[in-house]
Image: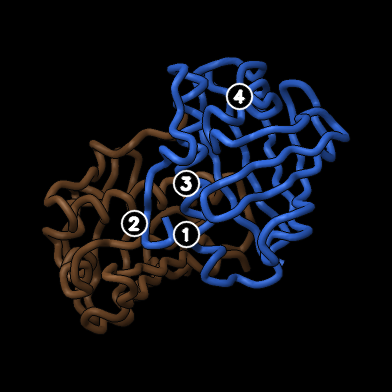
Chain colours: A brown, B blue
Amino acid sequence: MVDILHRIGVTSSPGDVYTALTTVDGLAGWWTEETDGDGNAGGVLRFRFEPGGFDMKVLDAQPAELVLWEVVDGPDEWMGTRVRFELKQEDGFTIVLFRHEGWKEPVEFMYHCSTKWATFLMSLKKLVETGTGEPAPHDVKISNWH
Amino acid sequence: MVDILHRIGVTSSPGDVYTALTTVDGLAGWWTEETDGDGNAGGVLRFRFEPGGFDMKVLDAQPAELVLWEVVDGPDEWMGTRVRFELKQEDGFTIVLFRHEGWKEPVEFMYHCSTKWATFLMSLKKLVETGTGEPAPHDVKISNWH
């Protein structure tokens, strides 16, 4: 089992970051404009992109502290993996510790997703700090796999 | 042992990407302006940043295909780890498969380095495609850890 790890710091409150991770408007502002569903614990969120999408069951959502999703629909490599956002305060930043955990193998698609997650987390930072993120289809393109 | 993985595609030739990975001018154009040493196999490269730096022994360098470094000086968590760039052509892109391998533990510094590597690889892409990258100290700041 292998994981994708990332860490960013956002110059806004943990509550603001939590809102961007648990509301449809927030998620549509940094990951993909085609987002719907319910971001509370027990809910299911549907994220769609041009080539497909992901459904996430919200396993846990603790205000200003933790958001944990399980992938319940999407590409084979993502099925059953979990996406974890841990929030904490440090030096006037809200630190987001991100982990996409439980990949079975380090396939080339995982390399791609790791870099895409970094650009989407920078989009989250930008959304919360400035009000405007870079969600799909306006996301930063990194390669032939977009 | 855990690894950081990334994948980008550069709309330039593998030879141009290889030059950016093996010459002091190239490396100084996307990773850190304070770079010196020898990027050929058997050489040692010295990369310096405001808080410190890394010395890399070049274990392997195969034109337009592979660059492999071993960290021989730097922070404890990096000592003995390896940084691998594999190049291949696909759909008119030069694909860079990046792997920073051999971390002992997924410490918080590893989360940080994973996201920083993504921004530096986007800087490499920008350098090779446009002639201008974003090397330190002009690098994209991602958190309180810079």
Could you tell me which chain the residue with mark 2 belongs to? A
Q: Which mark is residue A54?
A: 2
Circle 3 SS class: helix
As shown in the figure, which amino acid type bears the numbered disc 4?
Gly
Pointer 1: what residue? A78
Q: Are marks 4 and 3 on the same chain?
A: no
Q: How far apart are marks 4 and 3 (CA)?
A: 21 Å
Q: Kindly indicate whether the residue at mark 4 contacts the one at mark 2 (C-beta within 8 angstroms).
A: no
Pointer 3: what residue? A115
Circle 4 SS class: helix
Q: Distance between the residues labelled 2 and 3?
A: 17 Å
Q: Kindly indicate whether the residue at mark 1 contacts the one at mark 2 (C-beta within 8 angstroms).
A: yes
10 Å crowding of disc 2: few (<14), some (14-19), many (20+): some
Q: Distance between the residues labelled 2 and 4?
A: 38 Å
As shown in the figure, which amino acid type bears the numbered disc 1?
Trp
Instruction: Tell me where residue A30 appears, x and y as whole percent.
Output: 23, 51
Mark with earlier residue (2, 1): 2
Indicate the quadrant containing the N terminus of chain A: top left, top right, bottom left or bottom right.
Answer: bottom right
Q: Residue B118 carries which label?
A: none
